[in-house]
Amino acid sequence: MTRDPGEASAHMPVKIHQLTTPLRTAWRHGTLWPWCLAATAAVCGYAVSTVFHPGYFSSDSNYQLWQALGDQPVSDWHPAVLTLVWRGLLRTTGDLSAMADLQIAVFWGSLWLLARLVWKKTASRPLSLAMLSVGLAPHIMNFTGVVWKDVHLAYALLAACAIAFTARELPEGRTKTRWALFALGVLFIVYAGMVRKNGFPAVVPVFALLVLALWPAPGRRRWLAATGVLAAVTVAGSLGVNAIAHPLQTRVYAVIPVDDLVHVLTPAQVGDAAEQAGGSADFRDRMVTAAIRCQKRNIPSDAYLQCYPYHRPFDVMELSRNADVLVRMWSRQMPRHWQGYAEYRTRVFTKLLFQDNQAFRNGSSVNRSAQLHPMAAKEPPNKALRSALRNYVTGFVRDLPMLFQGWFWLAVALVLVLRRRWPGPYSRELRLLGASSLVYVLAYLPTAPESNYRYVYWPALSGTVALVLIASAYAARRRTAAKTTVPAPGRATAPEPAPAGVPA
């Protein structure tokens, strides 16, 4: 007996309806939306990775690529931990783009966690998409695929914040889960502190954010235990990096005294200070030459790399040989010339805040004296995509320059810290985010080597995320107020009760 074709076709819509009903129900209830956000984040991350493939290199990252491949000895002039991670990726995958792909994956994964939380708190698809759109903002996307320690600091801290916000939503109990998330967050925080030598001020508020998110009212013992774990992981990480890489100790901190001495003292005073500190005649002549060159060329900072007549090719150990003399020179001369020192540091810091420098990083540009590694030279970035990205970023630099200037993000950080209460559930977290950005920017007051947007990249990223969280909280509050004040159609509102003591 054969089935009537019309009967079979009649059953088809019923089967399709039965198959799509769970999907439509999940869409209406919102359980499907976090996966849609995950798919969107994956697509955006892949697109960004394609634009930056195989990663944009600066002089710093090119120098570390030589070390990661074993073509040059590892030094602590740049973070050895980044070199070791890159070396591991290269040996595992053999792909030059592995490092850029890793940092892009961490970044977009963190944004997805934050977007998922926005959706959970507001039930608003546009607001959750707004959090994902942070990754496409011109002042954030410009460095997403640049292998830079500043980018690694920012993304590691953002990952720690995303873990903290996620852990905050855990139900009571779940002790093992809390400690597991704490350990993961600590790993990102320790990496951030190791990958950027001056990143410690930014790390402390993020660590407090992580602890307070996991345990809203931690006692003294909890703080001591958490701090002990952080210290232990930091010490173990530092010892492990030194044991594996054996980095050359370059004492790169000495570039700061060079800047101060050359720009605060006259050339004659620099020579006298070098003699009094026990410097050699060769070192004294080089410091005097550096002071003269900076004055003639009107170079306001970065004197060691721009003015100091170091040997060619560049020797990272040359500075370390005179680091003790430079420290003695600085400690003796700066207190005597404190006014000139304050004026110089104020000038450099204000330039960092108000001059948008290097808002876009070319894909393969290095210093004249450096050579791009052959592995990177064989696989240059796509010129058409690089040009499109440059047009996108530089267009916003022209139309909204504040996005690429330190003063704006310093102001955002100040507002986040000074306001006592923010709408929504993340008031304390917003203040800690602002504190992290604030102390990180202020730490550059005595140490800024030059004006460069990458030095305020973490404040720009954290400030943008904080602004989206604040906008989401305001929008959710307005939506809630509208639902409670607007009566349903055809239904009268009940009269408000009269205040106590007043007759109705």
Image (tube, grey):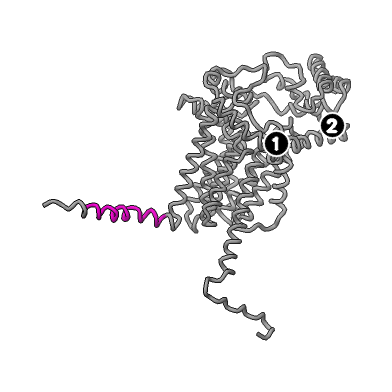
Amino acid type, residue under disc 1 in the picture: Arg
Which residue does the numbered mark 2 point to in the structure image? 334
- Whether 300 is among the magenta residues is no
Q: Nearer the viewer, residue 237 or 400?
A: 400
Drawn side of residue 493 relative to residue 333, left or right: left
Q: Is residue 84 above or below residue 281?
A: below
Q: Is residue 263 above or below residue 424?
A: above
Question: Residue 398 bears which disc, if any?
Answer: 1
**Residue 87 x %, y %:** 52, 26
Amino acid type, residue under disc 2 in the picture: Met
Tags 1 and 2 touching, CB below 8 Å: no
Q: Nearer the viewer, residue 54 or 490?
A: 490
Label 1 vs label 2: CA separation? 39 Å
Question: Residue at 74% of width from left, 42% of height from top?
Answer: 407
- Magenta range is 7-26
**Residue 375 x %, y %:** 53, 19
Task: Specify few, some or many for label 2: CA neighbours under 10 Å numbering under 14, 14-19, or 20 or more.
Answer: some
**Residue 378 x %, y %:** 52, 18
Q: Name the quadrant of the C terminus.
A: bottom right
- Whether 11 is among the magenta residues is yes
Name the magenta segment's main secondary structure: helix
